[in-house]
Amino acid sequence: MSPRSAHIRLPMAAAAALALTCLAMGPASAAGTTLDLDCQASPPIGSAQQFDLSAGVDAVAPETVAPGGALSVTLATEPMTVPGSVSGYTVKSIKDITLKAPLPTNATVTGTRLTGGSGLGSGTPSVRVSGGEIIMSVPGPIGGGKTFTLPALNLDLTAGASGGVIETRLSGTSYGSPGLTFTASVPILFVTVSVPTSCYPSPNPVLTSTAIS
């Protein structure tokens, strides 16, 4: 390995460490649920780095619904902050935030929409249903040092048969099948390094539960 390549490899490892704290999650409120996320940052050079994040989610749904009845569920993450710097390295921004949730059990989704949100940069958030999941995309970019709140995800549902339970939770079972992803942009030497990060909930608690009766 040449002296130059060794010199570059060390800052690349530091870039991975930056992604470890690229989202400082706000604490969950008393009525919310705390998600413990197992995450992996993958810099372009050097080994992947594992770390943990905690995310607060406020979820609202009725306790019961009649068979075939209509109901609404709201899932809202709590405020997050992108650090301006970590370990002496500047965090330029984060971008391409994606949050996924599986389609609720024992119900049919009749509508999805995003409401609220702040500090999300110039990109327009969107939501879609694909492959059995509800996918929220926030392009950003969101600058280092900025506090932001993701839009709340609102679901319109029709309940299934009596005796079932409608549950919502976050997607994700592994780094290869994550529920949360984002990319950190970190200036290193003469270039800006993109550090993709993938997270999944471990454990994965139920966020809302509605009995059909």
Image (cartoon, grey):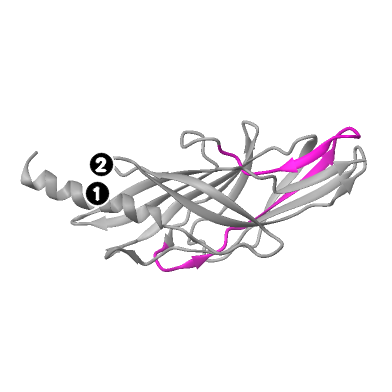
The part of the chain drawn in magenta is 143-172
Task: Determine contact: label 1, label 2, CB under 8 Å.
Answer: yes
* Disc 1 element: helix
| Rendered location of residue 101, percent (x, y) | 63, 42
**Relative horizontal placement of residue 71, taking residue 192 as reference (left or right):** right
Report the amino acid beneath label 1: Met
Q: Residues within 10 Å of mark 1 (few under 14, many from 20)?
A: many
**Does 156 appear in magenta?**
yes
Residue at 55% in and 35% down? 173
Report the amino acid beneath label 2: Gly
Question: On the rendered image, what quadrant is the C terminus found in?
Answer: top right
| Rendered location of residue 205, percent (x, y) | 66, 45
**Relative horizontal placement of residue 76, taking residue 53 as reference (left or right):** right
| Rendered location of residue 8, percent (x, y) | 16, 49
Residue at 56% in and 53% down? 125
Q: Quadrant of residue 104?
A: top right
* Disc 2 element: loop
Q: Which residue is mark 1?
A: 12
Residue at 76% in and 39% down? 109
| Rendered location of residue 68, percent (x, y) | 90, 38
Between 110 and 78, which is closer to the camera in this rendering? 78
Compare marks 1 and 2 and give the one earlier in the sequence.
1
Q: Is residue 140 above or below residue 67?
A: below
**Does 45 appear in magenta?**
no
Q: Which residue is mark 2?
A: 46
